Image: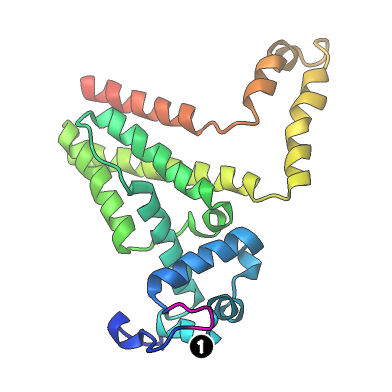
Amino acid sequence: MAKRVVPETARRRRRPTKQGQVLTHQLIVETALRMLREHGAAGLTARRLGLALGADASTVYRYFRGMDDLVLAIADELFGHAVDGWSPTGDWRADLRELGLRIHHAYLTHPQAAVLTASRVTGLPQEVATDEIILGILRGAGFPDADAVRIYHAFIDQSLAFSILDAATLALPAAAREADEEVWRDTYARLPATTHPHIAATAPLLVARMNHSAYPTALDMLLASASAQLRG
């Protein structure tokens, strides 16, 4: 049976923690994000989180039903980071492009958290608000509901898929990441045209592009396809 989470007003500590802070839902999420950035998913435990907060590990469970509940809250927090300060321009294509880039950037700012959370569906307020914004943009642009949902589906899954892919690269140890990047220059760029004519012909372009995210290009292709459909 799931543990009952105590309402925020009832669970607020009457005195500060050892760190001089009063525990809140937001503080726990922010501390968990920092721990993920510094120690990775394996380092995020209730015991370690309690130590970082200057509180007993059991205190975390007054705010969250379990560690998975905290993971969902972290995912929702990243959506909040993505839309914070965003405002629509009225140009549906430009607005969706900006939102996509913001989602991608929010996850890449916290690569360890992105790998842990980008595949989750939370149903929490920030995620729901973001989905409402995206669907509103598409329906406001004139897409029929079936098309709006189809494009929304492709848009959000593309954003999150690239977030996981690019975040996984950033989350690698520096030496491993640098070794992967060098493969394009040290292996692909040296393949002879006699055996690999197409790679050899495009090698300089591959070296210039392949260590950067393809997400902006993929996003533009998706939006161009949607725009062509709308015009049609």
Outermost residue toward the front? 20
Marks counted in the figure total: 1
Q: Residue at x 78, y 31 (%)?
A: 183
Decide if residue 37 is on the left or right side of residue 83.
right
Residue 37: quarter of image? bottom right
Is residue 232 visible from the viewing direction of this image?
no
Q: Quadrant of the C terminus?
A: top left
Magenta span contains residue 113: no
Decide if residue 87 is on the left or right side of residue 26.
left
Is residue 92 visible from the viewing direction of this image?
yes
Q: Residues within 10 Å of mark 1 (few under 14, many from 20)?
A: few
Q: Position of residue 122 (x, y in %)?
A: 38, 63
Q: Which is more toward the observer, 63 or 226?
A: 63
Q: Residue at x 36, y 55 (%)?
A: 80
Q: On screen, 220 above or below 170?
A: above
Which is the main secondary structure of the residues drawn in magenta?
Answer: loop
Q: Residue at x 56, y 55 (%)?
A: 115
Q: Position of residue 228 (x, y in %)?
A: 29, 21
Q: Residue at x 59, y 76 (%)?
A: 45
Q: Which is more toward the observer, 106 or 52?
A: 52
Decide if residue 156 is on the left or right side of residue 217.
left
User: The residue under label 1 is which amino acid type?
Assistant: Ser
Q: Position of residue 196 (x, y in %)?
A: 78, 16
Report which residue position mark 1 lands on.
58
Q: Which is more toward the observer, 42 or 190?
A: 42
Residue 146: quarter of image? top left
Q: On screen, 176 above or below 191?
A: below
| Boundaries of the magenta span | 17-21
Residue 43: quarter of image? bottom right
Q: Quadrant of the N terminus?
A: bottom left
Q: Position of residue 185 (x, y in %)?
A: 77, 24
Is label 1 in a helix, a strand or a loop?
helix
